[in-house]
Amino acid sequence: MEIADVARTVMERCDVLAGYSEEHGRLTRRFASHPMKEVNRLVETWMRQAGMATRQDHAGNIIGRYEGQGSSEKVFLLGSHLDTVRDAGKYDGVLGVLVALAGIELLHDRRERLPFALEIIGFADEEGLRYHYPFLGSKALTGSLEKSILYLTDEQGIPLIEAIRHFGGKPEALIFHCSEQKRYDDWLGYCEVHIEQGPVLEAKGLPVGVVTAITGLSRCKLVFEGEANHAGTQPMALRRDALCAAAEFVLAVERYAGTVEGLVATVGQLQVSPGAINVIPGRVSLSLDVRHQVDAIRREADQKLFEEAIQICTRRGIQVAREEMQETPTIPCTPWLMQLLEQAIDQVGGMPCALPSGAGHDAMIMSRCTDIAMLFVRCLGGISHHPAESVCIEDVAQAIRVMERFFLLLKQHVL
């Protein structure tokens, strides 16, 4: 079986899965939707063709197991997510599942077994598009779901607990899953292949790279309270315009983030009230997302930006309040798995490259229970979460070569 042919199959399968969408003309695949069921069914078929036993767990994750030789219960995990954002590209998440499957297909074609089992997990919900609760699939697998989330509702008012049942799962089983500690003791580790979703590999001219850490983030909502008034009768000097204060803050965020190496800060949501053409905005709420690989630098930046908001509002006679949304520490990848990936890249003729991940991934949740690693694949233009998301077949082939060699190095390490 030639690697080029295997890579071509992966690309073709990405095209096929992109056809399963809730919306005509664009790719949107939410948790527990009919297209999600069809994708699980199709991926399960491909897994079985590769000699894997399959099952769908109570969260809707599709899992394929390639048994090892002997009686060892140890298992090494691979995977990524099969859901998408709205108006998505073809490769985010899906590519990682299919590259892992390609690696197992090569083992199966040679009738080769490792001294431990391999499992591929196609996570049912990483993006959190339907219930605004990301990493549902990996949190369920690691026993870290909160009971309260079962009663979240989607835009149609359907509770998550009902969606899980409709998808074939038992929501009650998910909450008590965390008691199954023995299950995690058998895990050797987890490796996730994923498109980079950034421009670093392309800038370096490299097809793949080894992730050093998943960058931590701070998210909050800021609410600017001014005074709504008539747009035609209120003099400029007497206005308490909440939107002008918010706009000044947005530019301050951009300016400050540009002064700290490695820091990124984004205002991605903005709600203006009352939102009328002839009324001065009296209230504005906005989101602030701050990320840096060093937690102390991230926390300092987050605090300084809030202090900047206070100064702006004090000068303008505006009130500002802060609501915490999310605080996630940086998750380092496991050194011994990183080293095996770097060795694998070197042994297949590549140049090892280490880089952080600025985006969150299922691997960060899996790190609660096992060692983790990630292999990034170059994406053209660094574009992701967009229909223009693209990878080239040569890079996919290199990722498959790396994973094939990684399996052999993992075998030697375990022995």
Image (tube, rainbow, N blue to C red):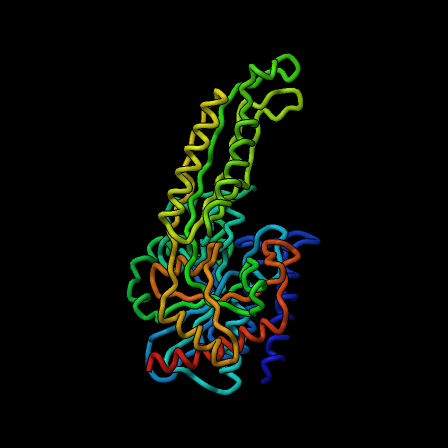
Residue closer to the observer: 47 or 56: 47
- Residue 151 vs 273, above or below: the answer is below
- Left or right for 183, reference 380: left
Residue at image point 35% right, 79% down: 413
**Which residue is painted at 39% across and 47% down in the image?**
297
Q: Nearer the viewer, residue 363 or 302?
A: 302
Q: Specify whether 329 is left or right of 312.
A: left
Question: For residue 71, what is the image quadrant?
Answer: bottom left
Q: Residue at x 62, y 69 (%)?
A: 13
Residue 63 visible in rendering: no
Q: Residue furthest right?
A: 25
Give 193 or 144, whichever is nearer the viewer. 193
Total numbered badges shown on the rendered structure: 0
Quadrant including the C terminus: bottom left
Residue 197 % position (x, y): 55, 58
- Farthest residue, direction top: 233
Task: Answer above or below: position of 140 versus 63.
Answer: above
Q: From where the camera sits, is residue 413 visible? A: yes
> Which residue does the image show at 58% across and 64% down from the upper left?
202
Task: Using the image, determine if residue 174 lies above or below residue 267.
Answer: below
Query: At which x and y percent is residue 411?
Result: 38, 81
- In this rendering, is residue 273 above or below 163? above
The N terminus is located in which quarter? bottom right
Q: Position of residue 97 (x, y in %)?
A: 52, 67
Image coordinates of residue 63 in percent, x first then y, are: 46, 67
Point out the residue furthest to the front here: 259
